[in-house]
């Protein structure tokens, strides 16, 4: 049964709804890779993501555990299913469609709300929603080599009625909007991706249709393994406050990890400088994300300003382009 009645939507933060799709998205080039990740929302490589179930039967929960972990055979991530209290990803089985926040957006959602919903369950939809959860976007919104010519009156009529009842804003955002070309590395449309919507030929003007993809495609697997690479394991380097540390992203997908100690409560500024386009994330000692930044500093450098209590913190630096980016930088933390 094709899932054309109820289609997944990316649950997005309200501030993003009326904006163009975020530009900080790329997919791996080379002609073979097409899967696309939203870079600013990736979990740190090697993350153990804590997950809990809001509701659901034992059978439903077991099905999720069974199928979702296929991603972790390729991505260097661990899905740790446990108590709902403290869970970073909260999975519900409400009659509310199938959706997920993208990547680390889940961390900003109030703790009493789900971050991933499975209004229906099968292998395909579980893999698809967990794809969003690890940062993947919809393939039909990739501008490169995209063969889809939407028949908008038909699509609008189908999705504005039950069971989706989407507004035009939501349809525009989930179907027609595409990520910015300048932020996508050359890629090729993969009709086998689990991240592609399934829809009938009547939804397009050119006869394009998409069958349900219920398993990870070879490209899905390869891409997850590169974005969350097991080949690159970060080591922890001291970042003394008020001293500059020279460093580099020496190979693609490298993540540099620093330990910073705040000796007194107050405002701290952590920033990089140099020619590389970097993304920086600040964590507390338990690994909870405090802040993330891409371009607030000089040029394309990140800068985070945070009010901190005394204690140890971790600062992660990675290249914006985790597929191909390398380069040097200086990192500095200062009080004030
Ligand atoms: Zn989706």
Image (cartoon, grey):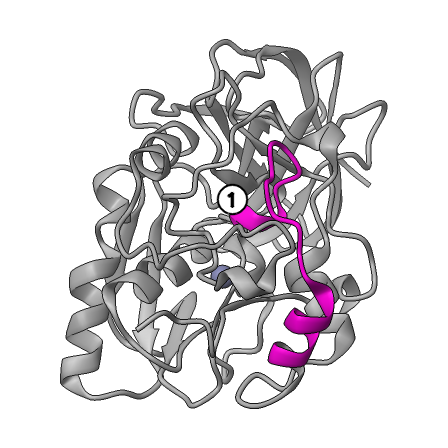
Which residue has dot 1 on it?
42
* 143 vs 103, nearest the viewer: 143
Q: Is residue 202 left or right of residue 268?
A: left
Q: Secondary structure at mark 1?
A: loop
* Residue at image location 31% in from the left, 36% down from the top: 221
Q: Where 288 falls versus 147 (above or below)?
A: below
* 269 vs 136, nearest the viewer: 136
Label 1 CB less than 8 angstroms from ligand 1: no
Q: Is residue 221 left or right of residue 281?
A: left
* 85 vs 70, nearest the viewer: 70
* Residue at image location 47% in from the left, 77% down from the top: 6
Q: Is residue 262 visible?
A: no
Check if residue 227 falls in the magenta segment.
no
- Report the magenta residues as a range: 139-158
Quarter of the image for residue 274 reads top right
Disc tally is 1
* Residue at image location 47% in from the left, 46% down from the top: 43
Few, some or many C-alpha atoms within 10 Å of disc 1 (few <14, some 14-19, many ≥20)?
some
Q: Where 183 falls versus 14 (above or below)?
A: above
Q: Is residue 180 left or right of residue 207?
A: right
Q: Position of residue 246 (x, y in %)?
A: 63, 10
Q: Position of residue 103 (x, y in %)?
A: 51, 53
Check if residue 146 falls in the magenta segment.
yes
Q: Where 128 falls versus 119 (above or below)?
A: above
Q: Is residue 252 visible?
A: yes
* Residue at image location 51% in from the left, 35% down from the top: 189
Q: Where 318 falls versus 148 (above or below)?
A: above
Q: Position of residue 62 (x, y in %)?
A: 15, 73
């Amino acid at each position: 049964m094709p899932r054309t009645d109820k289609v997944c939507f990316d649950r997005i933060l309200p501030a993003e709804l009326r904006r163009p799709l975020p530009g900080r998205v790329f997919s791996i080039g080379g002609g073979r890779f097409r899967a696309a990740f939203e870079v600013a929302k990736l979990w740190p490589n090697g993350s153990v993501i804590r997950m809990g179930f809001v509701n659901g039967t034992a059978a439903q929960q077991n099905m999720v555990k069974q199928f979702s972990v296929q991603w972790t055979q390729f991505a260097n991530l661990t899905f740790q299913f446990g108590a709902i209290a403290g869970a970073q990803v909260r999975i519900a089985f409400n009659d509310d469609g199938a959706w997920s926040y993208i990547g680390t957006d889940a961390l900003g959602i109030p703790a009493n709300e789900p971050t991933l919903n499975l209004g229906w369950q099968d292998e395909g939809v579980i893999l698809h929603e967990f794809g969003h959860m690890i940062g993947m976007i919809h393939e039909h919104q990739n501008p490169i080599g995209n063969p889809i010519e939407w028949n908008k009156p038909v699509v609008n009529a189908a999705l504005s009625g039950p069971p989706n009842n989407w507004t035009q804003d939501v349809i525009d955002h989930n179907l027609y909007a595409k990520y910015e070309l300048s932020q996508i590395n050359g890629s090729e449309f993969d009709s086998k991706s689990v991240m592609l919507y399934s829809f009938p030929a009547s939804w397009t003007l050119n006869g394009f249709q998409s069958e349900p993809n219920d398993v990870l495609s070879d490209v899905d697997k390869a891409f997850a393994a590169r974005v969350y690479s097991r080949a690159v394991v970060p080591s922890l380097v001291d970042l003394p406050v008020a001293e500059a540390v020279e460093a580099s992203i020496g190979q693609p997908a490298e993540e540099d990890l620093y330990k910073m100690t705040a000796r007194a409560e107050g405002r701290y500024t952590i920033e990089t400088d140099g020619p590389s386009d970097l993304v920086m994330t600040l964590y507390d000692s338990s690994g909870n994300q405090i802040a993330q930044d891409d371009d607030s500093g000089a040029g394309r450098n990140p800068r985070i300003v945070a009010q901190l209590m005394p204690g140890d913190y971790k600062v992660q630096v990675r290249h914006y382009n985790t597929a191909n980016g390398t380069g040097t930088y200086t990192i500095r933390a200062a009080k004030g």
